[in-house]
Image (cartoon, helix red, strand yellow):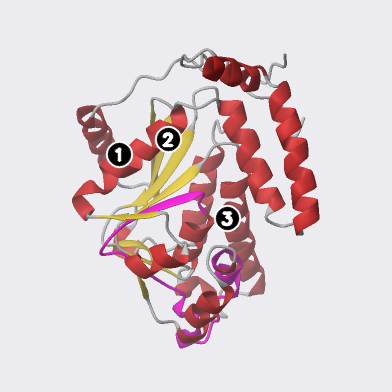
Amino acid sequence: MILGGFYKVSNLLKCSGTSWRILRRKMSAASSSLTLREQQDGIRRIVLNNPEKRNALSLPMLESLRENLLTDSQSDDLRVIIISARGPVFSAGHDLKELTTARGRDYHSRVFQTCSEVMTLIQDIPVPVIAMVNGVATAAGCQLVASCDIAIATDKSTFATPGVNVGLFCSTPGVALGRAVPRKVAMEMLLTGRPVSARDALMHGLVSKVVPEEQLEQETLAVARRVCESSRPVVALGKAVFHRQMTLGRDAAYASAAAAMLENLTLRDGQEGIRAFLEKRKPVWSNTDAVD
């Protein structure tokens, strides 16, 4: 199996706007946490919760984000993750106060290693991760958006990799950025540090969709709920294969994807989906890695 240990998932109830407003109040009540986490109906919401520091990805913030991504990530109940932020800045990137010589090379190494772990974890965990962006995302904050599987932004959001302007080239953000947008667009962002509008980010592929601010939550939840309607093991297998084949040459990518298609056909849910289509009915997913 390309992905093992899939899971049985109970039927998900669609959550109402009212229930999400209640969740938001509960999350706001725990304002002392660097990140907030709540989960309902298969959708986990992680909120960057340090608006006073522009939601900087300090080492404690990165560690908190990593914990909230990893906690019960193999749970039967988890189907999709949404990452958002409090305040007008999604994330301003690394906390530059942590990157002075006073902190020392070992501490700096921990910061960048942890950041890389978080960004790769987003792509390696078996459920889709959606960035819900309302505001500014710069440097490692832009890297976070670029690392997510889907990104939905408001029309007032902007994106930049301005490290070059303060003498710290955005080399690690460039890894995710260069895999999300055309190379020359990435290089212009990295070399000039100039911000890109939400519309330009959409045109270049950094975000999936741009909506008015008042529609952001509704649109993001609609995408998340649509993911929840599909078979969990099929989604997990598809996500893993997509990210893997993107690192391969064309011929190797086709070989990898074809092997995945064959494996998908052995899954009970793969055969159930085909039968349901032929019988003109809705599929009934087992949400397990059982094979037919």
Residue pictured at 52% horizontal, 41% vertical: 128
Q: Residues within 10 Å of mark 2 (few under 14, many from 20)?
A: many
Q: Residue 168: horizontal and vertical position, in percent?
A: 54, 82
Residue at numbered disc 2: 44
Residue 27 - label: 1
Q: Residue 14: horizontal and vertical position, in percent?
A: 33, 23
Q: Residue 162: horizontal and vertical position, in percent?
A: 45, 79
Residue pictured at 34% horizontal, 43% vertical: 220
Q: Secondary structure at mark 3?
A: helix
**Marks 3/1: CA–CA distance:** 24 Å
Q: What residue type is disc 2 on?
A: Arg
Q: Secondary structure at mark 1?
A: helix
Q: Residue 274: horizontal and vertical position, in percent?
A: 60, 20
Q: Which one is earlier in the sequence, the residue at label 3 or at label 2?
A: 2
Residue 119 - label: 3
Q: Is residue 228 left or right of residue 231?
A: left
**Marks 3/2: CA–CA distance:** 17 Å
Visible residue check, residue 263? yes
Q: Are marks 3 and 2 in contact (CB under 8 Å)?
A: no
* Occupied quadrant, residue 16: top left
Q: Nearer the viewer, mark 3 or mark 1?
A: 3
Q: Secondary structure at mark 2?
A: strand
- The magenta segment: 148-177
Q: Are marks 1 and 2 in contact (CB under 8 Å)?
A: no
* Occupied quadrant, residue 250: bottom right
Camera-side residue of 166 and 177: 177
Q: What residue type is disc 3 on?
A: Met
